[in-house]
Amino acid sequence: MRSTNYNKPSQELAIKIRGLTKSYGKVRALRGIDLDVGRGEIFGFLGPNGAGKTTTIRCLLDIIRPDGGKSSLLGIDPQADPVSIQALTGYLPGEMQFYDNLTVERQLRFFSDMRNLRTEWGYVRQLAERLDLDMKPQIKNLSKGNKQKIGVIQALMHRPELLLLDEPTSGLDPLMQQEVVSLLRDANTTGATIFFSSHIMSEVENIAKRVGIIRKGEIVEVAETSILTKRTLNRLTIRFKQAVEVRELGNLPEVEILSQIDGNSINLQVSGDMENLIHALGRLPVLDLVSERPSLEEVFMTYYKNKE
């Protein structure tokens, strides 16, 4: 069941989307999505490739025009006032475009000039130091990971009120991924709202309080991260006082037998309500039961498997 809240006043929302649609020829990329993100939130946007994550972000920034629906960022219509949106937001696309012959610093200054901003270069250098990025080499001599660092810095360097990030840690090693997450937490602490897509589930689980799942151009779930993991999937190890016939447990709705350790023990996975399983176990000689909290990645993959 989808959890949403459309009753917040617009001034409390950083992102407001209503009925957003977009098609590429016969392909319906967005099918009328609704979404609210409150000011000061860190919101994770999940979905497989082709689900509509990047199209949503590009429509929000007026990089592409939706076919229908409305959206606002920080109370501003991006189609009516794109200049203000550029000044107030930091955007990291999935694939950054650079001028290969520029140095890192010249490229960052170019990004700053495009926004007509007064960038604090002391802060830019601080960001580069934290990401271990040398600003003297030419872009063409950099690795994919170092180019990603430039993208992260250009999104953060003007201290925007809203960050829209498409796979912010893509191409980075684990230590740099952690540093980027730390930078995002710092930005959020100073008041920035963060909306980011990611395939790294542990990253989303660690930083995002709420997540939205998009599937085939539709928002199919919006919930607090902790609630989503607890509510959707449970993994159980059950030990019985004596050998029992457990086939009937596997026939219960949303219950899957993962393995039978021996005649007296079994591992189960339950997607959704556990009421039927609890009733069935009440008729069996249960010795003990251990419940394991799943990762967000397991929840996500199980959710998609069930929906297919």
Image (tube, grey):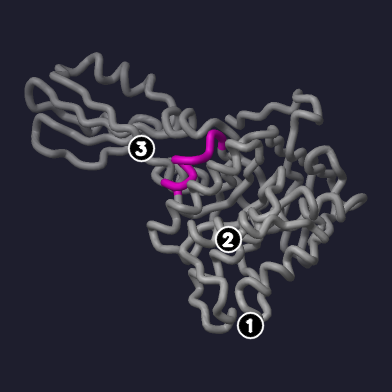
Amino acid on which the number 1 mark rests in the picture: Asp
Residue at 66 percent across and 40 percent down: it is 193
In reply to whether residue 203 is colored magenta, the answer given is: yes
Mark closer to the chain start, 1 or 3: 1
Q: Which residue is mark 2?
A: 125
**Looking at the image, can residue 221 be seen?**
no
Q: Is residue 79 left or right of residue 183?
A: right
Q: Which residue is mark 1?
A: 100
Amino acid on which the number 3 mark rests in the picture: Pro
| Magenta segment boundaries in residue numbering | 201-210
- Local crowd size for mark 2, using a 10 Å CA cut-off: few (<14), some (14–19), many (≥20): some
User: Is mark 3 in CB contact (under 8 Å) with mark 2?
Assistant: no
Numbered label attached to residue 294:
3
* Residue 56, horizontal then vertical, whole percent: 71, 52
Q: Nearer the viewer, mark 2 or mark 1?
A: 2
Residue nearest the viewer, comparing 203 with 272 = 203
- Local crowd size for mark 3, using a 10 Å CA cut-off: few (<14), some (14–19), many (≥20): some
Residue at 61 percent across and 64 percent down: it is 151
Amino acid on which the number 2 mark rests in the picture: Arg
- Local crowd size for mark 1, using a 10 Å CA cut-off: few (<14), some (14–19), many (≥20): few
Numbered label attached to residue 20:
none
Residue at 54 percent across and 56 percent down: it is 48
